[in-house]
Image (tube, rainbow, N blue to C red):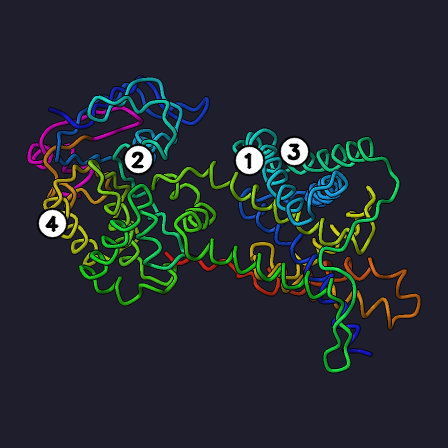
Amino acid sequence: MLLQQIADGVATGAIYGALALAIVLVYRASRTLNFAQGELALLGAYVSWQLVAWGVPLWTALAISMIALGALSAASERVLVRPLVRRHQPLPLIIVTLGLMIALNAVIGWAWTYQTKEVPALFGEGAVTVAGIALSRQDLGIAATVLVVAIGLGLLFERTRAGLRMRAAISAPESAELSGISTGRTMTAGWAIAGAVGALAGTLIAPELFLHPGMMAPVLLYAFAAATLGGLESPPGALVGGIAVGVVENLAGSYLPHGSDFKQVVALVIIVAVLLVRPQGMFGRREVVRV
Amino acid sequence: MSLLTVEIAAAGYGPATVLHEVGFEVATGGRLVVLGANGAGKTTLLRTISGLTTVDGSIRLDGTELVGLAPHRIAGAGIAHVPQGRGTFGDLTVRENLLVGGATRPGRAAAADADRWMERFPRLGERAARPAAGLSGGEQQLLAIARALMSTPRLLLLDEPSLGLAPKVTSELFSTLDELCGETGTAMLLVEQNAELALGIAETALVIESGRITVRGSAAELRDNDDVRRAYLGV
């Protein structure tokens, strides 16, 4: 029973982790929290749904949605975010991402109405039983997809020159610029990847939650909890944090009295607890400066 | 034929003007040292050449106008800048730091060059896969210079490389610098407080006070200049 609950939490947790990863990528690129990350993911889910409704195969629809949202995210960085980052205005920047969140949500409601839509599961129905634990195909598929994306991004960052440029720009922006690296371009790239990963998260979770304009609000909260837990600067931390939050959320829902009412409180408790006990998160490092 | 031609009417940060009427040239393969007290505008001068300030005037590298270009384009044009504090990428490994220096060059050439630097400086080679933040100050300065030379620049800008280093480490560093620029034919624009060592490896020199050039001449002339001796050589 307990193991079953944990297994159930891992798949949703992987999605929280994916959205947290998008938050972390943006934070690393622009030192800001993108509150519109959830609504960008939501828009990705709607784009996927719309394409499927028009007869596009589901996986093709997902790919198109990821590319489209990557482009939109990059464009919003270029137009809305960059001027404020360059002028070092963190507060207006947060207000801009909040505004983008509200605007995107309104546009989505206007374009697709507030009625709930059903999204086909990407990995089909049915379950596989392993050692007495029933794992749905959907959950297995989600976990595997997120894992593949995570490994792909890991290779991009650690093994390619483009990835090295991005890490250099994050580590010491001015030095990177003096070494001939366009930090503007690496920033935009970070946002583009975040947009695509977000669209993936939105499309993966839509069949579980049913697609409606309020779908991503609680998911964004869990993703923020996951990103905080993992350390805001660590992509692996975001994924591990996401799975931890997913499992804890699921256990709280099952074992606490009135647990399902308290699920979102769990996310807030995690955020507050991490900030009090270990503000840099599990995978974050304290800055060590040596002269 | 001069490599770098600087004709700055005014330069600074937004409304705050730091440099006034600063003009000079650096010859191809030449070595110019800029002396001056703290706050005189030496760092601002280097940052202006690299495109990190607002400037009114003209700065040309081999005839190409640099004013108005983004810093990464100026770097791409052939100017490498070792900033004050060395600008180390602390969480990247030593090898990655070198590769970042070669970011504007083809991947294979950069990788081969990184290996060459690590052979040349075994202290860097031994720590190739470790985060650069763990290096000592002298090693970081060496790494910063190697990183800058990874781009095979025509002009190397150095902002107080001796800062925070022990005297023995500093003098080793300067002879390495002398050697490297000699081998590669790279021109050097060096900003220093340590006038003794800097004048030792330079050909020409300037003194900046309150954002203006007050003395200029050959390195030997400046070493014999009484005002300069009193102010910067401590004799």
Percent x, y for residue A19? 67, 52
User: Which numbered disc, 2 or 4, marks the residue closer to the eye?
Assistant: 2
User: The numbered mark 3 sits on a residue in which chain?
Assistant: A
Q: Are marks 3 and 4 on the same chain?
A: no
Q: Secondary structure at mark 3?
A: helix
Seen at 15% across and 32% down, the residue is B205
Q: CA distance from mark 2 to mark 4?
A: 24 Å
User: The numbered mark 2 sits on a residue in which chain?
Assistant: B
Q: Amino acid at mark 2?
A: Gly
Residue interval drawn in magenta? B207-235
Q: CA distance from mark 2 to mark 1?
A: 24 Å
Left or right: residue B88 compared with residue B122: right
Q: CA distance from mark 3 to mark 1?
A: 10 Å
Crowding at mark 4 (Cα within 10 Å: few <14, some 14-19, many 20+): few
Disc with the residue nearer the chain's start (3 vs 1): 1
Q: Secondary structure at mark 4?
A: helix
User: The numbered mark 1 sits on a residue in which chain?
Assistant: A
Q: Secondary structure at mark 2?
A: helix
Q: Amino acid at mark 3?
A: Pro
Q: Which residue is identified by label 1?
A: A85
Q: Is residue B232 magenta?
A: yes
Q: Which residue is identified by label 3?
A: A92
- The reply to whether callout 2 and callout 3 are in contact (CB within 8 Å) is no
Q: Are marks 2 and 1 on the same chain?
A: no
Seen at 71% across and 53% down, the residue is A204
Placement of the C terminus of chain B among the 4 image quadrants:
top left
Q: Is residue B187 magenta?
A: no
Q: Are marks 2 and 3 on the same chain?
A: no
Q: Which residue is identified by label 4?
A: B179
Placement of the N terminus of chain B among the 4 image quadrants:
top left
Q: Amino acid at mark 4?
A: Glu
